[in-house]
Amino acid sequence: MLGWRLTGEERERARVRQMFGRYVSDQVVEALLQSGNRPELGGQSQTLTVLFSDIRNFTTISERLNAKEVVEMLNTYFERACAAMLAEGGSIDKFIGDAIMVEFGSPLPVADHAIRGVRAALALRAVAEEFANWMQQRFPGRDLPKFAVGIGLHSGEAVIGNIGSPARMEFTAIGDTVNLASRLEGMTKQLGCVILASEETIASAGAAVVCGRSEVVTVKGRAAPVRVFEVLEVKPGGNHDA
């Protein structure tokens, strides 16, 4: 009986690692294994923070590199970017071309999802700045635009769960919170900033977040205007939500 129970536990451990192991930190996997608060396979509503980021001028860069070089660039950058996201407890949702989507507060809920997302965005900004040097050294004389990224953050409720067909399922988040985070990322270039966060994210993250200018913008798909903030830094010791 004991042997059967251990086998069952091992199977559950393998199932959880298969579902989430590539996308979350080892600490999150262990928390999932020890927690009774597992995400439902059919989906559930959860409050979280979504981060979207993509590479500026990616089309121009990809036109000046060959196919193998583009893949090398993306894989090298994503490896560094994902390490920064996982360090803040982020869940890597998906890669969409040169873009990356990450959630904080999924699959397990956490109270400080917003400040985690902000810190991760700042870490990603630093990764991109360092990666710009890597690009210059790896591809000298190619007349490439400077490597840079745009990052959007929004906090709110989203539906999380396994979505897809029986042939291909993926654990993901969907809903307005996801859509707005993506829209804000798309606005970073026109507003002249690297990190753009919604009012909800800034309010949830607390007073430790130092912001630059604030704008009220019109977002496609939303009737009401949205207030957004340029994120500059987090004050020392600003590790928790207000």
Image (cartoon, rainbow, N blue to C red):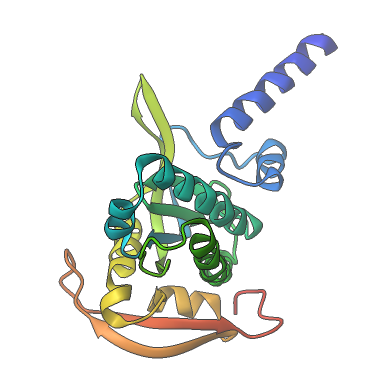
Left or right, 170 with respect to 38, comes to: left
Q: Residue at x 36, y 50 (%)?
A: 65
- The residue furthest front is 141
Res 44 seen here: no
Q: Is residue 18 above or below residue 237?
A: above
Give x and y (percent) for residue 93: 45, 46
| Viewer can see residue 235 | yes
Query: Residue 95: x, y in percent?
Result: 41, 46
Q: Which quadrant holds the N terminus? A: top right
Q: Is residue 191 above or below residue 220?
A: below
Q: What residue is shown at x 28% (from left), y 65% (from top)?
A: 183
Q: Across the whole image, how many numbered discs are drawn on residues? A: 0
Q: What is the quadrant of the C terminus in the image?
A: bottom right
List the single residue furthest toward the bottom: 213
Q: Residue furthest right?
A: 2
The foreground one among 66 and 117 is: 66
Q: Is residue 74 above or below residue 116?
A: above
Across and down, in percent, residue 104 comes to: 53, 57
Where residue 179 sits in the image (x, y, percent)? 29, 58
Residue at left offset 43%, top offset 45%: 69
Q: Nearer the viewer, residue 89 or 223?
A: 89
Q: Quadrant of residue 127?
A: bottom right
Residue 190 vertical placement versus 140 (above, below): below
Residue at 55% across, 81% down:
206
Residue 61 vs residue 92: left or right? left
